[in-house]
Amino acid sequence: MCCSTGLTPKQAGRFKKLAFGRSAFCCALFVAPKHLFSDLFTSPTSMFAPQAEPAHEIFRVAMFTLGVTATIFVTVSALLIYVVLKYRQRPGDDEREPPQIYGSTQIELSWTVIPVLIIVVLFLSTARVVYTIQNAPAPKRALHATVIGHQFWWEFRYPGYGVVTANELHIPVSPDPKRPMPTYLKLATADVDHSFWVPRLAGKTDLMAGQLNNIWMQPETPGIYLGQCAQFCGAEHARMLIRVYAQTPQDFQKWMRNQQKNAAQDPKAAQGRAVFEQNACINCHTIRGTVAHGRFGPDLTHLMSRDTIAAGALPNTQANLEQWIKDPARFKPGCLMPAMKLGDHDIAEIASYLVTLH
């Protein structure tokens, strides 16, 4: 028996676990909202921390809508609490039904006209922002690119530069508001419907079969902005990630000049290139300057200029490349890239060649 409580050791252990669980729960009630509030403004995919136009416009109309609906919630809740407290049943009250009032013109008008006015205001506010975003004229200095959604990766084309890349979109920032450099994107899909969404830069826009949609973004500060396919498109929808690199105009041009070059030809990786070209890799992938002209998979010409592979699922390292070539489904079950069934030696040779493609 426990001397101070009169409980057996087993009962005392259960009591401690129960007390600890309640304490942890109480702490979570106070700590979780704090972290939740913090994450709203610090998360890399938070719409509450816009860093570009038109994300600022979307944020403002969202906050206005939230403010109106919060006012309605507080007002209705306060009236409900007031009525419940004032007209609650008290000791000594009789059981008779209170007088019923029918046909109050003032009440009928108030709960009809006020909601209609609120809806009209919200509709006009939203319509103004939608019209402003969709009809924004493209300045002469704007960058034009095409986004093509695949199961389950992104293809980015820069027609004006003759560059094709994958999963990591590079765009310039606009340091001078008087000379904006927005990026205008045409959105298309190669298979099913997808949705392009980088919350801190722009709104969500669908990629639909047989239809070209458009979106534009004008980031203010350099950085990496994360996004996601926001339309369920199959088994690996959740791992169809987007990375947008907003760069200074100088850094963007430097990156673009490198992307315009053909693939590097490193003599030390000649054996790996030969293995790559002798296998089915060339049926799906393009490497400019080689016999590989496939269109089903990502362009690998400058593979090592990217930080990730598999649409953001893995860091871009030689070890991960080897594992990805050996068994893609291990990392992205349901992905359309088949396991090549190559020996470890051939896989290592191909990976050693791919890491030279800067």
Image (spheres, rainbow, N blue to C red):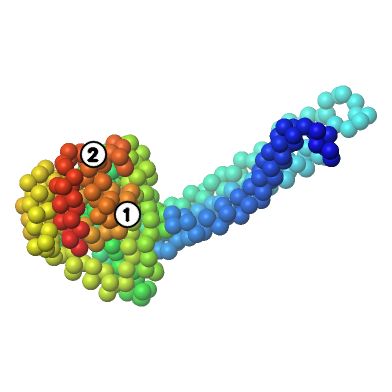
Residue 318, quarter of picture = bottom left
Query: What amino acid type is highlighted by mark number 2?
Result: Leu
* Residue 131 visible in the shown view: no
**Count of numbered badges drawn on the protein:** 2
Which one is in front, 232 or 337? 337
Taking the spot 28% from the left edge, 50% from the top edge, the residue there is 320
Picture disc at residue 190: none
Q: Is residue 206 left or right of residue 114?
A: left
Sequence order check: which comes first, mark 1 or mark 2? 1
Would you say the residues marked 1 and 2 are in contact, meaning their CB atoms lie under 8 Å apart? no
Other-residue count near label 1 (Cα within 10 Å), few / some / many at <14 / 14–19 / ≥20 = some
Other-residue count near label 2 (Cα within 10 Å), few / some / many at <14 / 14–19 / ≥20 = some
Taking the spot 37% from the left edge, 53% from the top edge, the residue there is 227
Taking the spot 83% from the left edge, 25% from the top edge, the residue there is 97
Query: What amino acid type is highlighted by mark number 1?
Result: Pro
Tell which tag, 1 or 2, sits nearer the viewer.
Answer: 1
Taking the spot 37% from the left edge, 49% from the top edge, the residue there is 228
Q: Is residue 323 above or below residue 95?
A: below
The C terminus - image quarter: bottom left
Find disc 2 in the rendering and name its residue.
Answer: 336
Picture disc at residue 315: 1
Q: In the structure shown, which secondary structural element does the residue marked by tag 2 occupy?
A: loop
Residues under labels 1 and 2: Cα distance?
A: 19 Å
The N terminus - image quarter: top right
Image coords of residue 132 (percent x, y): 39, 59
Image coords of residue 127 (percent x, y): 43, 52
Q: Is residue 333 left or right of residue 164?
A: right
Image coords of residue 259 (percent x, y): 18, 64
Q: Is residue 26 above or below residue 266?
A: above
* Residue 8 visible in the shown view: yes
